[in-house]
Image: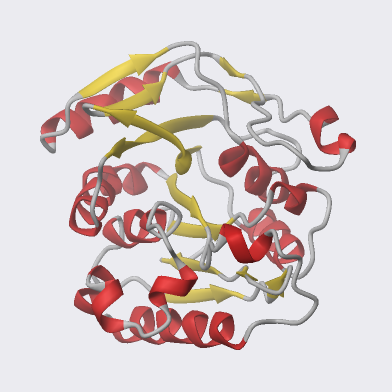
């Protein structure tokens, strides 16, 4: 059975600046060979329901601006899996989600950047699932729960977000790590390790650093998608990622064992 995984994808520059997180994902990918990946990223949001990629090949979308020119030359030649996409749509429909097929959508940087580290040969098929807008924390858990049965088929359910995501502070180019970033990362890790889902759902009332770590919740919700796909008895693991750009915590979290 494949695990569920939350990955902090940080800034697009993570593709070229792996830091601590890149090697950790590479090591995980070397030991984790799923049949396919089903990925949810906050850089693909859809109103009125959930969309699923159904194409056989997923183009690389460079959905960012103002970064190094080399980033725009990168391509991740991901293959799709239309049969799996149909199954994903059926599971989402069963879970009560309005769902549509998107045969033309490719992979945004929240998807292809971490996948470049996990599976650099692009040899694992990918199906992307949009985040419905609006979506709250409870709904994010439910979305993950709807996708959880895929794990029994050795499909990796991956939520790609950021453990912290304050874009205003990111653009200030902090030279030193902000103390709240480490505090918030430690708080999330402790709640995950102890199974305190209620605190993680009620983030803004429970964590004193939440508002600064996540002025908006879009990059936090993929963590709850991965958490929703967790099964009782799953092992909990941390992929140490450190802090980049002073304000981006890059830890990733694994629910279940890597084979």
Q: In which image quadrant can residue 205 be found?
A: bottom left
Residue 167 is left or right of residue 96, and the answer is right
Residue 108 is left or right of residue 204, and the answer is right
Residue 68 is left or right of residue 110, and the answer is right
Q: In which image quadrant can residue 201 be found?
A: bottom left
Location of residue 257 in the rendering, given as x and y in whole percent from the top left corner? 46, 66
Count of numbered labels shown in the rendering = 0
At x 28%, y 18%, the residue is: 100
Q: Relative to the observer, which residue lies in front, 53 or 152?
A: 53
At x 68%, y 29%, the residue is: 62
15 vs 109: above or below: below
177 vs 30: above or below: below
At x 20%, y 50%, the residue is: 139
Location of residue 211 in the rendering, given as x and y in whole percent from the top left corner? 40, 72
Location of residue 182 in the rendering, given as x and y in whole percent from the top left corner? 57, 85
Image coloring type: secondary structure
Residue 186 is left or right of residue 13, and the answer is left
135 vs 244: above or below: above
Location of residue 234 in the rendering, given as x and y in whole percent from the top left corner? 34, 70
Q: Relative to the observer, which residue lies in front, 123 or 160?
A: 160
At x 53%, y 60%, the residue is: 162
18 vs 201: above or below: above
């Amino acid at each position: 059975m494949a695990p569920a995984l939350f990955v902090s994808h940080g800034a697009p520059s993570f593709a070229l600046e792996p830091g601590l997180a890149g090697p950790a994902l590479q090591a995980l990918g070397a030991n984790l060979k799923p049949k396919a990946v089903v990925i949810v990223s906050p850089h693909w949001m859809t109103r009125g329901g959930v969309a699923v990629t159904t194409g056989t090949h997923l183009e690389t979308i460079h959905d960012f601006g103002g970064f190094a020119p080399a980033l725009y030359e990168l391509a991740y030649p991901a293959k799709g899996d239309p049969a799996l996409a149909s199954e994903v749509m059926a599971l989402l429909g069963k879970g009560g989600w309005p769902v549509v097929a998107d045969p033309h959508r490719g992979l945004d940087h929240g998807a292809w950047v971490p996948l470049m580290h996990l599976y650099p040969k692009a040899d694992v098929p990918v199906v992307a699932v949009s985040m419905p807008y609006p979506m709250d924390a409870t709904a994010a858990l439910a979305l993950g729960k709807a996708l959880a049965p895929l794990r029994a088929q050795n499909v990796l359910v991956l939520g790609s977000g950021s453990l912290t995501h304050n874009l205003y502070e990111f653009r200030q180019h902090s030279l030193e790590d902000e103390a709240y970033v480490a505090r918030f990362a430690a708080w999330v890790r402790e709640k995950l390790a102890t199974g305190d889902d209620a605190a993680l759902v009620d983030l803004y009332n429970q964590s004193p650093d939440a508002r600064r770590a996540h002025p908006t919740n879009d990059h936090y919700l993929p963590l709850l998608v991965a958490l929703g796909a967790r099964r009782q008895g799953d092992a909990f693991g941390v992929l140490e990622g450190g802090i980049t750009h002073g304000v981006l915590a890059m830890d990733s979290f694994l629910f279940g064992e890597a084979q």
